[in-house]
Amino acid sequence: MKHNGRAPLRASSVRPNLINLRNGEKRAIVCPDCTTWRPIRDRMVIAHRAEPHSGQPRHRRAEPGRTPRCPGSGQRIWFDITPEQWHEALADAVTEAASRTATTVLPKAFSPATDRTLRVRAERTPAGRMADWKAVQVQVGDTDAARKELPDGERPADGPELPLKPEHLERHDRRQAELGKQYAARKALASSAA
Ligand SMILES: [Zn+2]
């Protein structure tokens, strides 16, 4: 297939939720021209029509009036980031989206499962929070168990009483005297002003 003549699009310049570089999955991108997920083959966006489906039966597609080819067809993609880097960028984007209070409208993701996951995580629904907690439950359990294993006396709550006497008596007395003077000076100032 021939490319569309435009400069290659750097994968790093595409918002991470608009491209899929996940290992083991077919690479795909939201075509900037028709804003629809399109597979990438041979480092190019595959040839496609300007609309996802013409809605016409196959035998009629060659007739005049057929949906024209999308100019985004044959767009060269320059994979200048690794799947790991892309994944990190995606995770960052999801975290950022989650931190926003308003409901974030996410573009349609590549697969319905990914779409659901991203939406739930971005919207911070109770289900999303529950999923987050479920994901860390094992670690939380382990931490709790490890905490309980500490012998008595090593937990802060079981520690010896806090000493009530100052560590350096002289320093403490000096500080007290200073504070006393400051207080007296403030009081004198206040009474003279009154
Ligand atoms: Zn397109």
Image: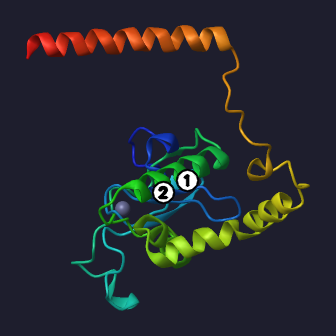
Task: Please give the residue where the numbered disc 2 appears in the rendered image.
Answer: 94
- Identify residue for label 1: 91
Q: Residue at x 35, y 11 (%)?
A: 182
The foreground one among 152 and 107 is: 152
Q: Where is residue 185 in the image (x, y as percent from the top left)?
A: 28, 8
Q: Do the residues labelled 2 and 1 touch (CB within 8 Å)?
A: yes
Residue 69 location (% of width, % of height):
33, 65
Q: In this view, does 193 lie to the left or right of 128?
A: left
Numbered circle sitting on residue 7: none
Quadrant for residue 27, please give it. Answer: bottom right
Tag 1: amino acid: Ala
In the rendered image, is residue 129 in sight? yes
Label 1 residue SS: helix
- Amino acid bearing label 2: Val
Identify which residue is drawn at 60% across, 52% down: 87
- Dot 1: within a 10 Å radius of its alpha carbon, few (fewer than 14), some, or many (20 or more) residues? some
The colour scheme of the drawn protein is: rainbow
The front one of 128 and 184 is: 184
Is residue 1 among what the camera can see? Answer: no
Q: In this view, does 14 lie above or below 141?
A: above
Horizontal arrangement in the rendering, residue 168 relative to residue 60 (left or right): right
Q: Quadrant of residue 119 in the image?
A: bottom left
